[in-house]
Image (cartoon, helix red, strand yellow):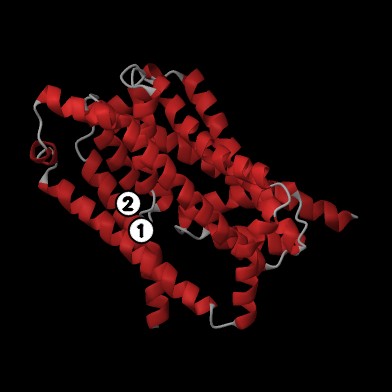
Amino acid sequence: MRKILTNILKTLLPFVLGIGILWWMYRGTDWRDFMHCVFHDMHWGWMALSLLFGVLPQLFRAWRWRMALKPLGEQPRARVCADAIFLSYASSLVVPRIGEVARCGTLKKYDGVSFSKSLGTVLTERLVDSVMVILLTAVAVLSQLPVLLQFLRTTGMSLDQVLGRFTGTGYVVTALCAVAVLGFGYYLFKNLSFFSKSREIARNIWTGIRSLRDVKNLPLYLFYSLGIWVGYYLHFYIAFFCFDFTCGINPVAAFLIFCVGTFAVLVPTPNGAGPWHFAVKTMLILYGVAEPQAILFALVVHTIQTMEVVLLGAYGWADLALLQRNIRKT
């Protein structure tokens, strides 16, 4: 009974946290403004281009994953890898962070790939991506540091004044996000320690992690790794041109906003809903966007990009079903 209750809480709490933050941010929003923004103010041509770059990083991730599995003697089809990635992102909307397990299970089911070996390569990906994000964020902060200092000097704003723009509720939301990240880290560590109890599984996971050194074309692997984050950035930055009030933000500033939003997604809510909105809205205000417009931007862009994740997940599920049906016919 206790285990069932724990599982229910692990599933519901991310939704509660995300919905709570969204409610707090949009409690005073006039939804007619939202509809007008989507159907009258937004430039859909730019949004269509942005959505193309929402697909490319997932394909890069699939191709990179396939490269990491080959040294382990696994030969999954590129098509199945791509479908597994599409499904993993969509499934994480239902249960945050379940995507890693879902995609490994998909490869196991359709191409017979060892679950524990593929999980090891996923852990390697997470390590590579973490290093990549940290480096990119450091570059973003350093490149924008003169601008931020000049902004503070020009406006006469001290650190206390900047922090003073947070309301009491804003501090509470930030604290909750920090607690959620720490809680998820503890949960992840606890689950990994569970895997270590099985020598065979632990050995396969370690083999998957070490597979990076045996990748035949390491430059291509690194190209995919960088391409994933360049694609994510363009997915986000091109959306700035959808609105007149954000199109003037320069690419470097947008890159810093992107990095801040990426860290906000670490909070385990569905697709970062809530924390991502809060982080992006706050950064847009810092760069001179009016708060109502910043709030609308975060809501519109996140909603449309989440719909894309759902559609790609539906495509992945349908394509896998088609593959299975064709196999049964042969």
Q: Secondary structure at mark 1?
A: helix
Q: Which residue is disc 1 drawn over?
A: 14
**Left or right: residue 291 compared with residue 9:** left
Residue at image point 65% right, 43% down: 219
In the image, 138 versus 231, the foreground residue is: 138
Q: Quadrant of residue 244?
A: top left
Q: Quadrant of the N terminus?
A: bottom left
Q: Quadrant of the C terminus?
A: bottom right
Specify few, some or many for label 1: CA neighbours under 10 Å numbering under 14, 14-19, or 20 or more: many
Q: Amino acid at mark 1?
A: Pro
Which of the numbered marks, if any, corresponds to residue 134? none
Position of residue 239 relative to residue 182, above or below, is: above
Q: Which residue is disc 2 drawn over?
A: 18
Q: Secondary structure at mark 2?
A: helix
Residue at image point 41% right, 21% down: 242
Residue 315 is situated, as x and y percent measured from the top left of the image, at 64, 43
Considering every residue shown, the one lying at the far right of the view is 330
- Do labels 1 and 2 touch, CB within 8 Å? yes
On the question of residue 274 being in view, the answer is: no
